[in-house]
Image (spheres, grey):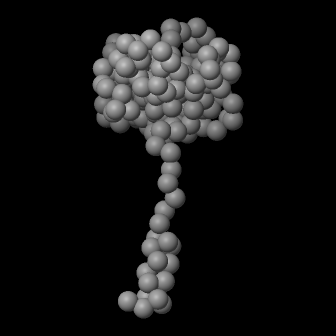
Amino acid sequence: MTFRVKAAVFLSLLLLASPARAQFETGAVLGTVRDTSGAVLPGVSVTLANVDTGIHVLRTTDERGAYEFFTVRVGTYKVSAELQGFSTREIPNVKVDVGARQRVDVELSVGAVTEAISVQASAPLIETDTSQRGQLITGDQTRALPLNGREYSALALLTAGIRLGASNLTTGGTPREGTFNVNGLRSTFN
């Protein structure tokens, strides 16, 4: 091949390349809308509003009363649901973390269109849609922790299911950086 052909192939490959994106920079909010008897409600308008930015997205429940918001940025949101003939329901302080699938089930009661029910206190939401475990350690939490030797990989030990590798436990000396077991797997799989 000549130099010009090689250069043309290289430039065409360079133009076709797409930028790499982070894998888990968003979460999801999903749930089911039911009435007070437990029957699902299709056609309900569900709004997800970011408390900090004011940006909101609207979805309509399907025939099973289910809704889902994909690629939701990390933050605090308010979920509201409304359907004609039912009271509007608002659920504030829905916290979305990286990679989380936050379930917010909504129950609507029969009422006037102008009547609205706002929940002020609620139990912490538990993610039941996946068995994936994870934890988000913020920059403020990192700065508040006493890190012996400023070893960044020691932060992994704060997450559930992680412990020091066997080589660190038997030597009694300085642990090797990054040798920890995640959910029972050997440190070579990290």
Q: Is residue 160 above or below residue 47?
A: above
Question: Residue 34 at what x, y percent from top left?
Answer: 38, 20
Tell me the residue at 37%/13% (across/down): 170
Tell me the residue at 50%/78% (across/down): 11
Which of the 4 image quarters holds residue 52?
Answer: top right
Q: In this view, does 185 lie above or below 27?
A: above
- Closer to the camera in the image, 186 or 79: 186
Which of the 4 image quarters holds residue 80?
Answer: top right
Tell me the residue at 61%/16% (across/down): 148
Which of the 4 image quarters holds residue 63?
Answer: top left
Tell me the residue at 46%/77% (across/down): 10
Screen quadrant of the C terminus: top left
| Residue 186 falls left or right of residue 103 | left
Question: Residue 134 at what x, y percent from top left?
Answer: 44, 24
- Closer to the camera in the image, 73 or 45: 73
- Closer to the camera in the image, 32 or 142: 142
Screen quadrant of the N terminus: bottom left
Q: Can residue 130 be seen at all in this image of the molecule?
A: no
Q: In this view, does 69 lie above or below 20?
A: above
Q: Can residue 3 be seen at all in this image of the molecule?
A: yes
Question: Residue 144 at what x, y percent from top left?
Answer: 68, 16
Question: Residue 171 at what x, y percent from top left?
Answer: 41, 15
Q: How many labels does the image show?
A: 0
| Residue 117 falls left or right of residue 1 | right
